[in-house]
Amino acid sequence: LAKTTQPISMDSYEGQEVNITCSHNNIATNDYITWYQQFPSQGPRFIIQGYKTKVTNEVASLFIPADRKSSTLSLPRVSLSDTAVYYCLVGVLNNAGNMLTFGGGTRLMVKP
Amino acid sequence: KAGVTQTPRYLIKTRGQQVTLSCSPISGHRSVSWYQQTPGQGLQFLFEYFSETQRNKGNFPGRFSGRQFSNSRSEMNVSTLELGDSALYLCASSPTGTSGHNEQFFGPGTRLTVL
């Protein structure tokens, strides 16, 4: 069974850059890699999505190597409000089609 | 635009009962996906519906089923509830589906407790 793995937790300080890596060995050839942020008692919220190389938006960057078996979410200059759980999401082909698989989530704690 | 709405927000059932959860996607979105979130298993994909057809399916038993209506609203049903079905059930909508370049918008979830 395909596994999508991430570190369970990370600590950082305000103003630092945080990099969270997700391993996804069995990603479907045509599928994108998406990262979400989740606060307690809320549904996940989209952060960034990419297929290969590097993608940047106003809140984060996403680095994807050529083999696409991993990806790294980069959060520049984190603040206390970035304390949340971060999930990667990839599609993996199964018998029923494209099964979306979340990583286990990385709990980021930003300290003052 | 209104976001994804889920009803009810909280539900308590007993073992053996069945339950139906409802999701209303963002207006214009044709894809609705369902996820189960538990502390032990994390976020797990249940299934995706697009234009009233199930398009993708996760590894859940047949007790978990769903459907989508012509207005894109979706329902999820769980029959013969087990204690392990206690979870937060999340619904997400997207314009064209979960494959490829598509952002999903999640609702707040329905918290199901099975006693």
Image (cartoon, coloured by chain):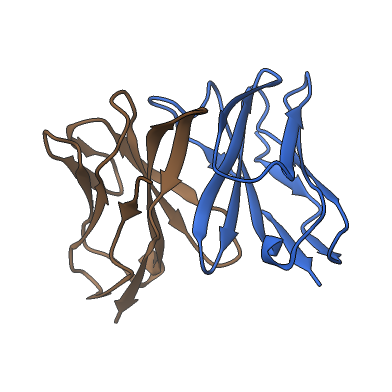
Chain colours: A brown, B blue
- The single residue placed furthest to the left in the displayed view is A66
Q: Is residue B96 above or below residue B1?
A: above
Q: Give the residue drawn at x 66%, y 41%.
A: B4
The image quadrant that residue B17 belongs to is bottom right
Q: Give the residue drawn at x 75%, y 30%.
A: B67
- The single residue placed furthest to the bottom in the displayed view is A112
Q: Is residue B73 above or below residue B3?
A: above
A84 with respect to A70 (left or right) = right
Residue B60 in picture, x, y percent from top left: 61, 45
Q: Give the residue drawn at x 68%, y 34%.
A: B25
The C terminus of chain A: image quadrant? bottom left
Residue B91 in picture, x, y percent from top left: 64, 43
Residue B54 in picture, x, y percent from top left: 64, 25
Between A81 and A63, which is closer to the camera in this rendering? A63
Residue B48 in picture, x, y percent from top left: 60, 32
Numbered disc total:
0
Between B26 and B73, which is closer to the camera in this rendering? B73
A8 with respect to B92 (left or right) = left
The image quadrant that residue B93 belongs to is top right
B12 with respect to B3 (left or right) = right
A44 with respect to A109 (left or right) = right
Q: Is residue B73 visible?
A: no
Between A93 and B104, which is closer to the camera in this rendering? A93
